[in-house]
Amino acid sequence: MAAYAYFVLTKQDYILPEIKDRQFLIGFYKRAKKNGLDVQRYNVIKDSIAEIERDLNRLRDPLYLHLPSSVLQDASANNTAAKQVKDTTT
């Protein structure tokens, strides 16, 4: 009954992640308006931060560090061994 009432009021399906996102955004915009936050400027700043972090992760990638192949092979062997141990424990 509550799911149908939610659908009638919002015209959206009753899916928990979407409800949580919607409630977060409603509260976020309400608090932003109350505190005088410029949401569009905030979004531009967050997008630029995400872009810079992606660039840093790309630059820190071992293939771009020009490491010797022996170091890369050792690292990949350690990762596969760790994955095998994790798979056997679960």
Image (cartoon, grey):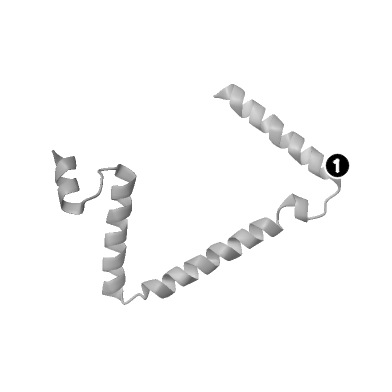
Q: Nearer the viewer, residue 7 or 31?
A: 7
Image x and y of residue 38, in percent = 37, 76
Residue at image coords 29%, 55%: 22
Check the image and report above or below for 83 versus 49: above
Q: Secondary structure at mark 1?
A: helix
Image x and y of residue 47, in percent = 50, 66
Residue type of the residue flagged with mark 1: Ser
In the picture provided, is 40 more to the left or to the right than 32? right
Image x and y of residue 80, in percent = 70, 32
Query: Local crowd at mark 1 within 10 Å, few (<14), some, or many (≥20)?
Result: few
Q: Nearer the viewer, residue 5 or 45?
A: 5
In the picture provided, is 67 more to the left or to the right than 10? right
Q: Nearer the viewer, residue 14 or 64?
A: 14
Residue at image coords 67%, 57%: 58
Image x and y of residue 88, in percent = 60, 22
Quadrant of the snapshot with the N terminus: top left
Quadrant of the snapshot with the C terminus: top right
Query: Which residue bears the numbered disc 1?
Result: 70
Residue at image coords 58%, 23%: 89
Residue at image coords 78%, 55%: 65
Check the image and report above or below for 72 versus 42: above
Q: How many marks?
A: 1
The furthest residue to the top: 88
In the picture provided, is 39 more to the left or to the right than 76? left
Q: Nearer the viewer, residue 1 or 37?
A: 1
Rendering quarter of residue 77: top right
